[in-house]
Image: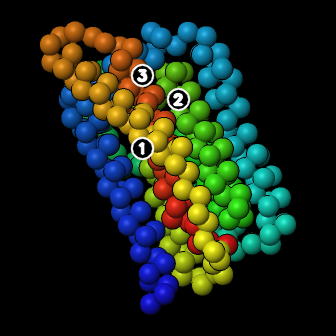
Amino acid sequence: MRSSLRTLPFLWGALVSAGSFVAVYVVFVQSYIGQVIDERAFAGADAWKGDVIEFAHTFLNALPVASVVIGAVAAIAIVLVRRNWLVFAVAVGAAIGANVSTQVLKYTILSRPEKGVDVGLSNSLPSGHTAVAASAALVVFLVASPRLRPVAAVVGSVFAIAAGASTLVEQWHRPSDVVAGMLVVAFWGCLAGIVLSWLRLPGAEPPVRSKLWPLVWIGSVCAAGSVIALMVTYFSAQSGTQHLFIAYAGGVAAIVATGFVLAALGNRLYRRLA
């Protein structure tokens, strides 16, 4: 019974992550107006990228190797001290699952219907680069000690957000692709929590009390700003006008909101893991 109670929050987290992923796909890929909104943010990134493009280009070129190397070195260093090899194995399994499923979803399962918005472009959801960065952060977060896990959540979320936003600036992905990539990793993070809860590992006593309220508040403000920008973009599309900067800013705000809120919720879910 105790294992069931510990598993339930992770099960709900997995279901909410999966449901949110489906909602993002249906709204921004399957619907015409969703494609228009996403495309406006994509075009806005090209129009307003400025000097940020240089950072984005350099960062993305180094991202795959940097994510694996930094994540592996940090995780293994922590595991050597804490000797939580079982947690490490589960975390690596979740990271592999997140990245494999991202590629399978994007290239095999999901499709982008032709709506006359972006002629000739194939499906690009979810973002593989975002999944790589977020899954590397997930591994470090899971193996970290309860005292350092909130710090790992903050640093990891900033890293994933930077990766996702860079793919938008570099014109590799739309905002919905990035958000979907984060949700895929969140789903696998919850699956890892289910596995760990059933392995009867020792819990953190007392549970970690840090709730990362600053991330929640920043994420909430960004989410509200993203909704407002989405509405402005929607009505401007209906009237035949364009507000590319607002659409772009709304897309970035959605990425920041998703990264920070998921980090705060993940820290909350794992507060009892030692």
> Where residue 23 appears, x then y in whole percent?
28, 47
Q: Give whichever of 105, 168 is nearer the camera.
A: 168
Q: Is residue 127 left or right of residue 240?
A: right
> Where residue 164 appears, x then y in whole percent?
53, 34
Residue drawn 32% across the image and 24% down it: 229
Nearest to the eye among marks 3 and 2: give it.
3
Task: Look at the image and tell me whether residue 4 can be seen.
Answer: yes
> Where residue 50 appears, x then y in whole percent?
55, 9
Is the C-beta separation of discs 2 and 1 under 8 Å? no
Q: Residues within 10 Å of mark 3 (few under 14, many from 20)?
A: many
Q: Amino acid at mark 1?
A: Ala
The C terminus sits in image quarter: bottom right
Task: Look at the image and tell me whether residue 42 can be seen.
Answer: no
Dot 3 lies on which element?
helix
Q: Amino acid at mark 3?
A: Ala
Is the C-beta separation of discs 1 and 3 under 8 Å? no
Q: Is residue 140 left or right of residue 35?
A: right
Residue drawn 41% across the image and 62% down it: 13
Residue linked to disc 2: 165
Picture layout, residue 68 above or below residue 204: above
> Where residue 12 appears, x then y in whole percent?
38, 67
Dot 1 lies on which element?
helix
Q: Amino acid at mark 2?
A: Ala
Residue 249's disc number:
3
Picture layout, residue 55 above or below residue 177: above
Q: For residue 160, what is the image quadrant?
A: top right
Tell me which numbered mark, 3 or 2, is placed earlier along the sequence: 2
Residue linked to disc 1: 180
Picture layout, residue 105 above or below residue 167: below
Residue drawn 22% across the image and 9% down it: 241
Q: CA distance from mark 1 to mark 3?
A: 18 Å
